[in-house]
Amino acid sequence: MSKLLQLHDFGAPGGMSFDALRNSAASAGCSTKGGAGKSSCGSAAGPSDLPPDVWEKVKNHPCYSEQAHHHFARMHVAVAPACNIQCNYCNRKYDCANESRPGVVSEKLTPEQAARKVVAVASTIPQMTVLGIAGPGDALANPAKTFKTFELVTQTAPDIKLCLSTNGLMLPDYVEQIAAMNVDHVTITINMIDPEVGAKIYPWIFYDHRRITGVEASKILSERQLLGLEMLTARGILVKVNSVMIPGINDKHLIEVNKAVKSRGAFLHNIMPLISEAEHGTAFGLSGQRGPTAQELKALQDACEGEMNMMRHCRQCRADAVGLLGEDRSAEFTTEKVMAMDVEYDLAARQAYQAKVEAERDAIAAAKQREMQSLADETASIKIQVAIATRGGGVINEHFGHAHEFQIYEVSTAGAKFVGHRRVDLYCEGGYASDAGIEPILKALNDCTAVLVAKIGLCPKDSLAGAGIEAVETYAFEYIEQSVIAYFKDYLARVGKSEIRHVARGDADIRQGAFLAV
């Protein structure tokens, strides 16, 4: 077997010693401020929490900023079909229009087709700020196609941020090229740092011209992933680490993964639930491996948050997703449609639109702050979760029956915090309740005290009440976090007057990867 590359095989930038480089990489990730272990950066950070150059990179990136994900869109282009590892949770599918999970696309693109599609989308959706290459295989198992796509896009649309996602196996070989192309954001999927754990997740890797299996394969993969992470952060490239939570296999181990990636300078950690429905055809799905419940996932994210901030708004997107997180407009931009479009890239118009979005974000932040001030005198130890029906923009603007997902906020006297989302099938189709009915939605929201909606019918409102979930229309078309805090204040007042009784809620289902309504 050929020698594994180590950090000393590469030149340290700026003449730094490698010990200094490692320390610099660690501090370039999430620095701590205001308390032991509490990160000052991450998905909920604002301009006062980050260096100006870092804030510029994340302020309108919907994956790196939880606030930005309400306002800005991303797109993935499916130019990378080949993969060099096998994961037990992955099954790549093509020509699949109504399944939402990584590794799924409706059509594969050449770099030239992808570049035209990017310009078409950016001209139609001015809030689209980020281009990512995330498969359907691995971006760096297809390096020529990946970098050619970036090159073509940069020539026409230089304002769009470039991202790639990788399993990390080939990452050390391409760090210099990534940096040279001004790719400021890289996601590495790291599910283990213990090869014994990795052997249960990865049947094989293809490396050094041969297929390698078992513990040896996972050892190579882990060493390459961590080396690549160190090299990226040493060059000022922001790294988000994705980890799939697999109960009974790596759930407890991910706490150690979290510590390892923070120490190497990762900017953000995204712990995602395993998608394990049998219909997806993955090894874990066919073997009956379950995914986590909502509260199992939240408990692990909470445990890791003491080390670094977590990304909790991930939607585990398709490899050809287009639009805001939580929506998919890819059907509007098929190759046939894109080739027929009259595309004109208007950079000034895009910048003007995004300036309006920034002004709206400032208004949302100010409204939240005003509402927070009224919580200053509250001392209750109560915490509740509230579900939100929204189409985006940071506003409660969706009808209950039309919601594809609900965003979940945890609220206490410390304020409101986004903690996740729950994908559901539509309750209302064509003006009538769907065949699935209300039960799956009740299971998805079972840990929530209330759901805030723009509008809701009497039948689902009664069903929610029967399950102990209050449906609230009072805050229709108001800002989300301001409304969540206002609802919580009212909730505390009613508990204090014995008008209602605070009851601890149960667990809830996660339906990640659900089939979407067509």
Image (cartoon, rainbow, N blue to C red):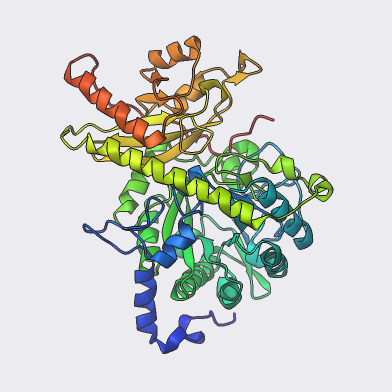
Q: Nearer the viewer, residue 265 or 50?
A: 50
Quadrant containing the N terminus in the rendered view:
bottom right
Name above or below for residue 113 compared with residue 502: below
Where does the image place residue 65, in percent across and percent down from the top left?
45, 52
Name above or below for residue 296 compared with residue 155: above
Where does the image place residue 353, in percent across and percent down from the top left?
57, 48
Q: Nearer the viewer, residue 9 or 116?
A: 116
Q: Is residue 269 left or right of residue 428?
A: left
Q: Is residue 92 visible?
A: no
Q: Residue furthest bottom?
A: 15
Quadrant containing the C terminus in the rendered view:
top right
Q: Nearer the viewer, residue 388 or 55?
A: 55
Name above or below for residue 271 compared with residue 427: below
Residue shown at 37%/28% (left/top)? 448
Residue shown at 24%/16% (left/top)? 500
Where does the image place residue 290, in percent across and percent down from the top left?
50, 39
Where does the image place residue 281, in percent across and percent down from the top left?
65, 42
For residue 133, what is the image quadrant?
bottom right
Q: Is residue 41 left or right of residue 340?
A: left
